[in-house]
Image (cartoon, rainbow, N blue to C red):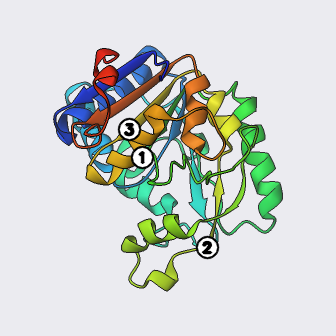
Amino acid sequence: MMMLTMYKIFETVDEVSRYTAQRLLEKIQTAPKAVLGLATGSTMEPVYAQLLDDMQHSPTDVSQLTTFNLDEYIGLSAEHPQSYNFYMYQHLFNHLHLPAANVHLPDGLAHSIDQACQAYSAAIQAMGGLDLQLLGIGSNGHIGFNEPHTCFNSRTHVVELSEQTRIDNGRFFTNQNETPTHAITMGILDILEAKEIILVATGANKTNIMAQLFESAIDESLPASALKQHPNLTIVMDREAAALLPKQAYKNAV
């Protein structure tokens, strides 16, 4: 059984987004110098939209906020419409106007990828680690781009994307063959060292993996199971993503 600090199940994606955005806003307002780990993907789009809307009604100083993104495709420039750099500026950073020096995203075109990976983890540690890490989950249980059998002690590294991940992400590209084969991802240990973690899962395409995650042991074959070791984890789901969870899961919901 999952040992969760908080386990939230809502009826709709809108409710999930409102709750998650409010948690982010509260963190920023109570800790203006917070270091946030941010995620991308379709699950996060309504979360960021809600956060920006909330900030219009509750003006918030973000001048001292620092962000680190989870991952980036290797071979895509920051200007490529499917890069995560482009995604973050489109959905959040262009509207938040964070100081450029405070925004950190892996560089998919770095001259030395391995050195860039080492520097990325070092930069996170130099900030004292992440105060809050926002996560999605892949259909095979990956977090960031940490695919099954990634070592739980991993730092930021290069990963070859699994066939399932490339299929899942291929819908964002004009041609499936254009989907990158490799990515830079924050390591599982980088993620686990965050003081607080919020994992968000919505939609019927996450139903099976969330049931697997609930039942699974902590095992490197399911990367997200590493989160069960974390003392301050919140899993936020809509009713569709939670559809196959046993009644026992709902008893643990807050």
Q: Of the residues under marks 2 and 1, which one precedes in the sequence?
A: 2
Task: Determine whether, in the image, residue 23 is placed left or right of residue 46.
Answer: right
Question: In the structure shown, which secondary structural element does the residue marked by tag 3 occupy?
Answer: strand
Residue 131 seen in the current view: no
The mark lying in front, picked from 2 and 1, is 1
The reply to whether callout 2 and callout 1 are in contact (CB within 8 Å) is no
Q: Residue 196's x, y, as percent? A: 53, 22
Amino acid identity at mark 1: Ile
**Spatial separation of the CA atoms under disc 3 and disc 1:** 12 Å
* Snapshot quadrant of residue 12: top left
In the rendered image, the quadrant that contains the C terminus is top left
Say which of 194 and 232 sits in front: 232
**Spatial separation of the CA atoms under disc 2 and disc 1:** 23 Å
**Spatial separation of the CA atoms under disc 2 and disc 3:** 25 Å
> Residue under circle 2?
181
Question: Could you tell me which residue is drawn at 42 percent across and 46 percent down?
Answer: 209
> Residue under circle 1?
209
> Residue under circle 3?
200
* Snapshot quadrant of residue 136: top left
Q: How crowded is mark 2: few (under 14 residues within 10 Å), some or many (20 or more)?
A: some
Say which of 191 and 212 sits in front: 212
Say which of 209 and 233 sits in front: 209
The mark lying in front, picked from 3 and 1, is 1
